[in-house]
Every structure is written in structure tokens, then in C-alpha cells.
Image (cartoon, rainbow, N blue to C red):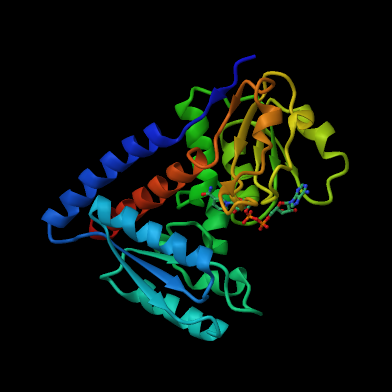
Amino acid sequence: MDTISLIGKELAAALNSDTAERAAALTERGAAPRLVLVVANDDPASGWYVKSLQRAAGRLGIDCDTVDLGATATADAIRSQLRGLCADIAVDAVMLQTPLPDGVALQDVSSAIAAAKDVDGVSPHSLGLLATGLPGFPPATSEAVVELAKHHDIPLAGKHVAVVGRSNVVGKPLAQLLLAEDATVTVCHSRTTDLPAVTAAADIVVAAAGRAGLITGDHVREGAVVIDVGTNEGPDGKIVGDVDAASVQGKAGALSPVPGGVGPVTTALLMRHVVRAAEASRA
Ligand code: NAD
């Protein structure tokens, strides 16, 4: 069977063009949208991601500053910085980068990000809004999975979706978003017994485990849709997903590539959240 490639480029471009127009309208009113990235690590991958967010913001007319607290920042220092930014009316959106310093857990500090500025939906408040179906910002990566499926006309209502991964930033919020789309959701994790049996029973498999090559042809039933959220460093330094594309190709009905699938849509949705936050605060 031909496996359709669920590329994210077109959707990201459409989202970005809308975001750039809205950012320009805000700037014309003297209210240019402003995102602040808070960093407390010296991790090269995080540094690379920060640069790519700065470039994306710049292209769309969004001001993007970075506050670097250093890799030894305390939880108190991070919380105090986040509270200060959330109290600043000149800041529309705040994103805390991971990894955090040793001994600092995301849930210990993310509650200091006000929901109105929490454009990556990481705080317990934002996750609660999502779980209860109230308006707020969902984590952009999870939202990207749903938007990518919709863009490629993949129905979700009534479908059985197996989500592989139960983190607070991807797997769990994605399960909530899929439930809101009337999908039947099974969340799998590292202690799931017989993962291939669970995923092979699903219409749609979403791989978000951070394990290169975890999902093979044996995990997927003929014609199923496979969406790969994983971003892992391959042996040659290149980014690879969680799906062993070679063994899934020809069996799955559709597969999202890594890179070029969920990733560009995630960044585009984040930037759309920034503009929405700015519109709401200037309304
Ligand atoms: P995480 O390490 O916090 O969580 C991984 C989850 O996968 C855990 O719940 C764990 O139980 C599960 N898991 C691990 N090994 C498993 C196995 N063998 N079988 C079944 N489940 C297993 O990771 P995360 O932050 O949720 O990120 C997941 C992946 O998504 C990573 O590769 C990350 O780089 C990627 N990611 C991509 C984007 C994007 O925009 N494309 C954004 C965020 C994260």
C-alpha cells in the first residue's frame, strides 16, 4: 500500500501567514507582540531550539527576548523571574525552556506562569483548563498532532488512537485534546505490557516516547495512520523520530516525517498563541 506522507510544511505556512498579518496589525497599533524565553540550562539542544524560536518570531514580526538565568539557578529564582515577567504589561507571552537545573522539576516552577501568558500550556492551571474543556493554551506539540491530522483530512471522531508516551508536556495533554475530538484514546507508556498488541489495535498511533525506532511495522496494523512526535539524535547526529519509517512504509496508510511533520506545525502554533495572547491583553 502507498503510505501518504503527512508533511507539516503547508499547514505551518498557512498558520504563519495569518500570524504575521495579525502581528503586523498589532504593531501598527503600537502594540508589537512580545515573547520572552526563560532559559536555565547550558544544554546545546535547548540553545539550538531557542535560536530557532527567535528566528521564527523574527520572521513573523514578533519581538522575542531571552532571559538566561544560568544552569545553576534555584527554583525560587526561576519562579521569581516568571512572576515578574507575567506582571509586566509589556510582555505578552512567556516560555520556560527545559531542561531545568538539577533538582528543579517543571511542575515546581511552571505554576508561576500566568495562564494568559502560558503559550506552551505547561502550568498546572493551563493543563487543568485543557482537561476541563475551558479556554486556554494547550501545549503546542500536542495541538500540532491534532491540527496535522485535521489538515490531512484524517477523521478523529470515533477512531481508536493509541498515544505512546504519558508526559505532562506531550502524551497526557494530547490524550485530552483527542478526547475533545471524540476519539477513543489509549495512553501507553514504558510499563505498558505488550505495546505492539495495543498499538496494532488502533486506527491511529501517535509516537511520543523519545525512543528512536520504537514503533516498527509490527506495532501498526495495515492502513493505520502513524504520527511521529519523537525527535531523537540519530547515530550520525541527524534528527530521527520514534518510528522506524522503513518498516512502517508500505504498511501504514499515512506517516508523518521527522523532520518536517509535527515540528514545523508546533512552532507555527506557538507563534499563533503569542499573537493571540497579545490580542487578548490589548483588547
Ligand atoms: P518524556 O521523556 O518526558 O516522556 C516519554 C514518555 O514515553 C514517558 O511517558 C514514557 O513512559 C514513555 N516511554 C518511554 N519509553 C517507552 C517505551 N519503550 N514504550 C512505551 N512508552 C515509553 O518525553 P516528552 O517530553 O514527552 O517527549 C517525547 C518525544 O517528543 C521526545 O522525542 C521529544 O524530543 C519529542 N518532542 C517533540 C516536539 C516537537 O515539536 N516535535 C516537542 C516536544 C517533544
Which of the pair 88/146 is nearer the observer? 146
x 70%, y 49%: residue: 211
Hey, which quadrant is residue 233 in on the image? bottom right
* Image location (x, y in percent) of residue 231: 58, 50
- Residue 194 position in % (x across, y down): 87, 39
Quadrant of residue 175 in the image?
top right
Residue at image location 62% in from the left, 77% down from the top: 104
Count of labels shown?
0
The residue at 38%/32% (across/down) is: 10
Which quarter of the rendering shows the N terminus?
A: top right
Residue name at image x 51 percent, y 29 percent: 6
Task: Decide if residue 208 is on the left or right side of residue 86.
Answer: right
Relative to residue 229, is residue 34 depicted above or below?
below
- Observer able to see residue 183: yes
Quarter of the image containing the C terminus? bottom left
Q: Nearer the viewer, residue 5 or 95?
A: 5
Percent across and percent down for residue 220 are 74, 28
Furthest residue in direction top, as rendered: 1
Q: Nearer the viewer, residue 196 or 192?
A: 196
